[in-house]
Image (cartoon, rainbow, N blue to C red):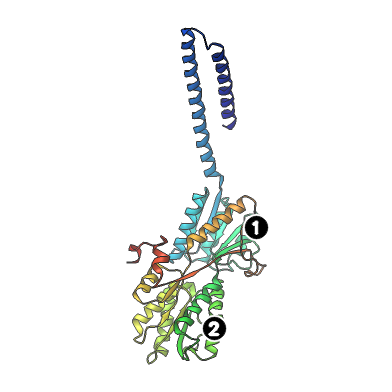
Amino acid sequence: MKRKLLATLLSVAMVATVFVGCGSQSADAPAADDAAATDDAATDDAAADDAAADDAATDDAAADDAAGEGGLIGVAMPTKDLQRWNQDGTNMKSELEAAGYEVDLQFASNDIATQVSQVENMINNGCQVLVIASIDGDSLGTVLAQAKEKNIPVIAYDRLIMNSDAVSYYATFDNYLVGKTQGQYIVDQLDLDNQDGPFNMEIVTGDPGDNNVNFFYGGAMDVLQPYIDAGKLVVQSGQIAKEDVATANWATETAQARFENILSSYYTDKDLDVVLASNDSTALGVANALASNYTGKYPILTGQDCDVASVKNIIDGKQSMSIFKDTRALAAQVVIMVESIMKGEDAPVNDTETYDNGTGIIPSYLCEPVFADVNNYKELLIDSGYYTEDDLK
């Protein structure tokens, strides 16, 4: 098409040159030459129209080529059962398609075997980059060995894939900072630096197979442990160790059942002052347990993800805060990383020290989280277009 356009333009230029020469020779010619000049002008117009048509056709073809140039990207999400993964998957797909890529988006219903099968199909179907939010960080080593054999780069999305040297990059929020932010919120709300306490606290984290739990829990406990050691924070249940406070699959029902047991065992005659919940699905389980099995002073309750149900609870005074991780920002960053990879370039990262998946440090890009509470949720969530006011009614 480009050669055809060039040939057409050269022909037009040559014809125009001939006509200009003829015109200069017949400037004082009689009226018969005027008719010839009129014919010449018509010919020029027709040639210009042909060139314009070729230009338009070339532009259309270029647009079609650009749409197909991006290639096929596989995006594997763990489940549709949690709102945040629906948003992550949708945002990722729309951002990648807007950049000209074809996207194979799959959700695995929190079933490891299903996710392994989906990733294997992506590899066999010719995906050129894989973006994977794993269900279990240790479950994908075998299938990702196939990706490495075919030189398919892998971006671990939000959850670090462990013990696989096929992982090229990691894109996430600063999950240690998530935990620290939750811990510092508790310190500030209870004024622990100035109050003696003691304040009663319980802890609820997420799935033990999710490597992020290590960072959420670690960041929070780095802030709160000194106050526990000083006796200002007291965990009446004694359940402090990470393995004791875990919640399989981050399930709301599992968190609720455990917390109902804690309340009936330790808080029939005591106030519960604060609950460190690592995310919104576990916080929702705690809130449900409090509603059904607790009559004391309502505790401070943390969360993460700003799910609709939890934001409504924040508005209603049933949850204190939630870490806002704008999945639009993370999706946009992953698109930048994919485009760099597809160009044969190194993807942009901002952390090359923190995230070791057992085979070495994985170059990472960390987005910074913030927290939403009743004072700022409108600015963070509604004014930014993340939610509408109707979403939160």
Say above or below: 242 vs 306: below
Density class for disc 2 (Cα within 10 Å; few <14, some 14-19, many ≥20) is few
Q: How many marks?
A: 2
Q: Where's the C terminus, which quadrant?
A: bottom left
| Residue at 52% across, 27% down | 51
**Which residue is the extreme one toward the front?**
28
Mark 2, residue position: 241
**Which residue is the extreme one toward the right?**
360
Can residue 350 be seen here? The reply is yes
Q: Secondary structure at mark 2?
A: loop
Say above or below: 2 vs 159: above
Say above or below: 135 vs 125: below
Answer yes or no: do the residues labelled 2 and 1 have beta carbons within 8 Å? Answer: no
Q: Say which amino acid is labelled 1.
A: Lys
| Residue at 51% across, 29% down | 54
Q: Say which amino acid is labelled 2.
A: Ala
Check residue 148 in the rendering and tell me which mark sits there, or answer none.
1
